[in-house]
Image (tube, rainbow, N blue to C red):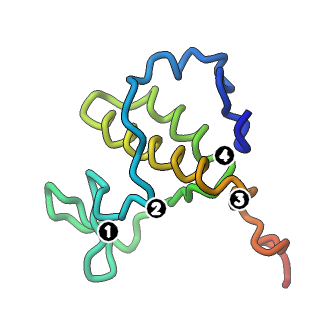
């Protein structure tokens, strides 16, 4: 089983992984520039198609590949998106899997950095 608990057949009993197309291994590290939807420009995330920047008052969440739960979240999200967004999510899943395989020692629980919880006084 992988460090994230998502080994074969996976937390879903293999049902979702059987639906995913076989793809070549993701290149690691995949640069942010390979993100299909957004680029980082002038300190903001900008939609590549519309050119619209995410407004400062709009909350954004970033999942890092080292987060032990990120792959599970991405795989679930894949079940919710339409075909228009499917490939972008598959690309991220492949990149996260490549990171996990290359760096299993760097996976960790979210919110803990150097054994300090983000909500602590330290």
Circle 3 sits on which residue?
Answer: 110
Q: Is residue 25 above or below residue 56?
A: above
Q: Position of residue 112 (x, y in %)?
A: 77, 67
How packed mark 2 is, by other alpha carbons closer than 10 Å (few <14, some 14-19, many 20 or more), is few
Say the numbered circle drawn on residue 60: 2
Circles 2 and 1: CB atoms closer than 8 Å: yes
Q: Is residue 2 above or below residue 101?
A: above
Classify residue 94 as left or right of residue 36: right
* Mark 3 or mark 1, earlier in chain: 1
Marks 2 and 1, Cα distance to the nearest angstrom?
A: 10 Å
Q: Position of residue 122 (x, y in %)?
A: 84, 84
Say the numbered circle drawn on residue 45: 1
Classify residue 19 as left or right of residue 97: left
The answer to which of 69 and 24 lies nearer the viewer is: 24
User: Which quadrant holds residue 46?
Assistant: bottom left
Secondary structure, mark 2, is loop
Say the numbered circle drawn on residue 69: 4
Q: Position of residue 41 (x, y in %)?
A: 26, 76
Circles 3 and 4: CB atoms closer than 8 Å: yes
Circles 3 and 2: CB atoms closer than 8 Å: no
User: Which quadrant holds residue 107?
Assistant: bottom right
* Mark 3 or mark 4, earlier in chain: 4
């Amino acid at each position: 089983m992988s460090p994230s608990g998502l080994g074969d057949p996976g937390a879903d009993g293999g049902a979702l992984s059987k639906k995913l197309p076989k793809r070549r291994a993701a290149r690691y590290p995949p640069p942010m520039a390979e993100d299909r939807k957004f680029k980082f420009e002038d300190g903001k995330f900008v939609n590549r198609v519309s050119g619209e920047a995410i407004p400062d008052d709009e909350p954004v969440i970033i999942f890092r590949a080292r987060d032990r739960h990120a792959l599970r979240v991405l795989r679930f999200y894949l079940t919710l998106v339409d075909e228009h967004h499917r490939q972008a999510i598959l690309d991220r899943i492949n990149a996260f899997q490549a990171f996990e395989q290359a760096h299993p020692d760097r996976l960790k629980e979210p919110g803990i950095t150097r054994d300090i919880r983000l909500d602590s006084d330290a």
